[in-house]
Image (cartoon, grey):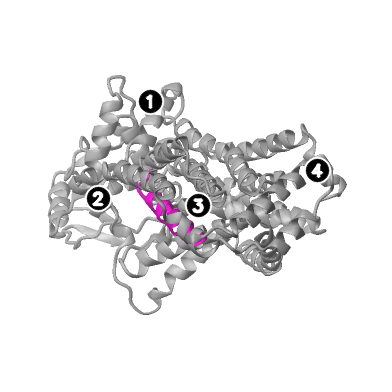
């Protein structure tokens, strides 16, 4: 790189200032409208368990007041970290690290003293931890890309794309553990890069790297069990690079790298160093890698990580809630349903760099957004591919990250099609390889920038910025549940006292109803409904009986709203009332008027 822009980016102060700009933009996007979207059932789990509270105290099979349903969201001064861990491990299927951190974080945010949600946990406070961890991913991915490619430019491009990525912003605006797990993914990938570099230099992994890498991997598993998929993909990538990719960079390619830059550019010196290392490793015999001095440190990393992960196996197996809480991603496929995971996966990949208002209420805007996104990707993909081809010739780590990403994607489809667990249904699970995608995109954009493609790079980044604004404006990546729409519908259609009933298998259904209750309080709606959580076991009629018994105790007239009620409906003295209201995401609802 010999252009003025290259010289500027090499200035000792300019890269730092530029990184601060990306961090500032990313922070603004992640904190903007942070409490705008209604909390959904998974977030209610985070809030309840992080407070050290439990769902078991909420009565079942009887009518309860709105405030009783929201009781788990009231902070308790007596609850401590031990309560957080106990309730989480006995009622949920997640490891405790993030929830413990949230418990400590929420001490900084006392419950609101004014407003309709007075006394309840601060939603903004809970989400802000995930948001700030998401902000931390910007300098983290910069450091990873900068280190892996020995390129300031690649680091800046990766940071710029992470700052505006609609997918990254979506994860950061939920009170969930994905941004914390994503930081561990970035750190673990850093360990992978260091390991490959040591192998290329015919040096065994140092003890410090083994210990740090094992520590990072252990903390990653303690943040989210799906972090194990990251580790599996890293293992595949390491084996593929060591076994099949050691001789990819030829001497002529290395000389081409050397010829690229200006004589006095620091980054060119680093590229030359990288090229020389790649040439040196080309003569490395594969058999040399299977000697104890190479193998033992890698075995130590694998064994230490395995030990750190196996700690959670007994906890997971003894938890009776585990299978029930994951039923939504399990099940048989029929006909065209076999293709749905492919389209679900593609949709998630697209949103990593682009998402216009496809969930807006105005149909013309939705159609225009889809058309623009399609045009954008047909234009951008060839540009990104050409940049990637250039980087493949320069840096072996391009192949490393590509193999890692494709290995992770392959694992997703193995789980989906062979194990019957459709991981593609939850876009958030792509956190296991999302940082690597951003590094690959950053590397491609860096090559485009160098090869007179600055306008294209700017346009791609601006599309990312518009996409980030789409997410924070609730026009894309809307929550899976929309109680903010259902609560007004109930208010508008009911003048009599209201009972909202649902079938209850796990605390997921608690969260569905808590969302409605939360919105009644937040919006200040005058209706004060009661709720029924009708326990459901293998015999669905247990919920039917609970509903009948509850109705027998309540005065008439009464408006009965059956919301996500999955049991036979056998009612006496109640007549279904037709509704003209639109469908509401996450809620299947019916209104019955009970006069007798």
Chain part drawn in magenta: 224-241
Which is more foreground, mark 1 or mark 4? 4
Residue corresponding to mark 4: 265
Precedes in sequence: disc 4 or disc 2: 4
Precedes in sequence: disc 3 or disc 2: 2
Q: Position of residue 157 (x, y in %)?
A: 69, 48
Q: Position of residue 371 (x, y in %)?
A: 66, 68
Element on which disc 3 rests: loop
Q: CA distance from mark 1 to mark 2?
A: 31 Å
Vertical arrangement, residue 512 with respect to residue 211, above or below: below
Q: Position of residue 295 (x, y in %)?
A: 40, 50
Which is more foreground, mark 3 or mark 2? 2
Precedes in sequence: disc 1 or disc 2: 1
Left or right: 583 in relation to 542: right
Precedes in sequence: disc 1 or disc 4: 1
Q: Position of residue 470 (x, y in %)?
A: 61, 51
Residue corresponding to mark 2: 322
Q: CA distance from mark 4 to mark 3?
A: 46 Å
């Amino acid at each position: 790189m010999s252009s003025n822009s290259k010289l500027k980016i090499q200035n000792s102060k300019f890269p730092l200032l530029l990184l601060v700009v990306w961090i500032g933009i990313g922070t603004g996007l992640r904190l903007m409208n942070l409490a705008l979207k209604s909390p959904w059932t998974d977030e209610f789990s985070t809030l309840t368990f992080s407070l050290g509270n439990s769902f078991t105290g909420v009565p079942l099979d009887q009518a309860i007041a709105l405030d009783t349903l929201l009781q788990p969201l009231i902070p308790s001064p007596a609850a401590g970290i031990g309560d957080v861990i106990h309730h989480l491990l006995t009622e949920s299927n997640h490891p405790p690290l993030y929830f413990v951190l949230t418990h400590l974080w929420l001490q900084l945010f006392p419950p609101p003293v004014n407003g309709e949600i007075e006394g309840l946990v601060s939603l903004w406070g809970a989400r802000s931890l995930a948001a700030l961890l998401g902000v931390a991913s910007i300098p983290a991915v910069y450091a990873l890309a900068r280190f892996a490619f020995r390129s300031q430019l690649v680091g800046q491009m990766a940071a710029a794309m992470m700052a505006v990525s609609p997918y990254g912003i979506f994860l950061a605006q939920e009170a969930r553990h994905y941004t914390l797990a994503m930081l561990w993914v970035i750190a673990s990938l850093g360990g992978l890069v260091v390991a490959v570099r040591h192998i290329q230099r015919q040096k065994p992994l140092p003890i410090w790297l083994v210990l740090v890498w094992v520590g990072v991997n252990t903390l990653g598993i303690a943040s989210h069990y799906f972090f194990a998929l990251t580790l599996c993909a890293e293992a595949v990538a390491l084996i593929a690079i060591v076994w099949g990719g050691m001789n990819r960079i030829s001497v002529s390619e290395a000389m081409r790298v050397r010829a690229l830059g200006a004589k006095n550019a620091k980054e060119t010196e680093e590229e030359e160093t990288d090229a020389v290392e790649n040439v040196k490793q080309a003569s490395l015999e594969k058999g040399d890698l299977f000697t104890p001095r190479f193998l033992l440190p890698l075995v130590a990393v694998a064994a230490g990580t395995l030990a750190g992960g196996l700690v959670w196996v007994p906890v997971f197996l003894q938890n009776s809630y585990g299978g029930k809480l994951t039923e939504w991603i399990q099940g048989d496929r029929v006909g065209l349903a076999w293709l749905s995971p492919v389209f679900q996966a593609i949709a998630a990949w697209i949103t990593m760099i682009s998402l216009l208002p496809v969930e807006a209420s105005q149909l013309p805007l939705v159609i225009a957004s889809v058309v623009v996104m399609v045009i954008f990707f047909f234009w951008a993909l060839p540009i990104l591919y050409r940049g990637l081809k250039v980087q493949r010739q320069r840096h072996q780590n391009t192949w490393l990250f590509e193999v890692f990403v494709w290995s992770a994607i392959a694992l997703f489809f193995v789980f989906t099609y062979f194990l019957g667990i459709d991981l593609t249904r939850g876009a958030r699970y792509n956190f296991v390889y999302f940082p690597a995608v951003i590094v690959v995109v950053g590397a491609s954009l860096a090559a485009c920038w160098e090869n007179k493609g600055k306008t294209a790079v700017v346009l791609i980044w601006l599309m990312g910025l518009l996409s980030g604004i789409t997410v924070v404006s609730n026009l894309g990546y809307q929550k899976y549940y929309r109680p903010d729409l259902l609560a007004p519908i109930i208010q508008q259609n009911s003048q009599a006292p209201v009972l909202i009933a649902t079938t209850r298998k796990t605390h997921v259904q608690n969260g569905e109803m808590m969302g409605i209750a939360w919105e009644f309080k937040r919006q200040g709606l005058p209706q004060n409904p009661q709720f029924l959580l009708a326990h459901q076991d293998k015999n669905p009629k247990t919920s039917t009986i609970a509903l009948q018994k509850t109705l027998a105790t309540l005065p008439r007239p009464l408006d009965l709203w059956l919301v996500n009620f999955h049991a036979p409906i056998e009612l006496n003295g109640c007549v279904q009332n037709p509704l003209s209201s639109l469908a509401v995401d996450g809620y299947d609802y019916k209104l019955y008027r009970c006069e007798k």
